[in-house]
Image (cartoon, rainbow, N blue to C red):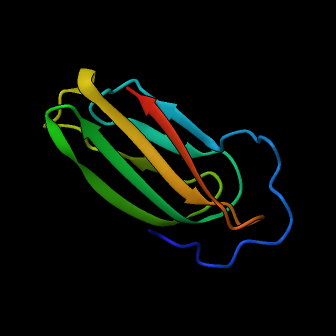
């Protein structure tokens, strides 16, 4: 199990908040992901398909406005799911968001 870089605060998290990520799918084998929110200190990306056990990228610290590329050249893009996991600095909790290209 992964732990937050900082211990979570004692207050309860908001019930929902806008996901900070935007995806540019113009090139499906190289989707560009932009952090449209604030600074995020620990980001991981998982790409998994039914025929592929998956691959993981550690992006680490991602600032607001940063763009990152996920290379899916050798993957079946019609069968892949991308998952982003990160810790919000405001509450120290881990959040997860999934999308397809």
Q: Which residue: 18% across, 27% down?
A: 76
Residue 70: give x, y in percent of width and height. Answer: 34, 45
Image quarter where the N terminus lies is bottom left
Q: Nearer the viewer, residue 98 or 38?
A: 98
Instruction: Report whether 84 appears left or right of 74.
Output: right
Name the residue furthest right: 11
Image quarter where the C terminus lies is top left
Q: Which residue: 27% across, 43% down?
A: 71
Image: 63 above or below 72: below
**Quarter residue 41 falls in:** bottom right
Image: 36 above or below 28: below
Image: 42 above or below 36: below
**Quarter residue 34 falls in:** top right
Name the residue furthest top: 78
Residue 30: give x, y in percent of width and height. Answer: 31, 36
Instruction: Report whether 37 appears left or right of 28.
Output: right
Image: 63 above or below 52: below
């Amino acid at each position: 199990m992964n732990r937050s870089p900082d211990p979570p605060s004692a207050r309860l998290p908001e019930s929902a908040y806008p996901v900070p990520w935007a995806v540019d799918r113009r090139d499906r084998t190289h989707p560009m992901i932009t952090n449209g929110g604030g600074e995020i200190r620990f980001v991981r990306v998982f790409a998994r398909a039914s025929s592929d056990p998956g691959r993981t990228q550690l992006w680490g610290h991602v600032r607001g406005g940063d763009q990152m590329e996920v290379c899916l050249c050798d993957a079946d893009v019609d069968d892949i799911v991308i998952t982003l996991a990160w810790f919000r600095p405001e509450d120290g909790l881990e959040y997860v968001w999934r999308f397809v290209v």
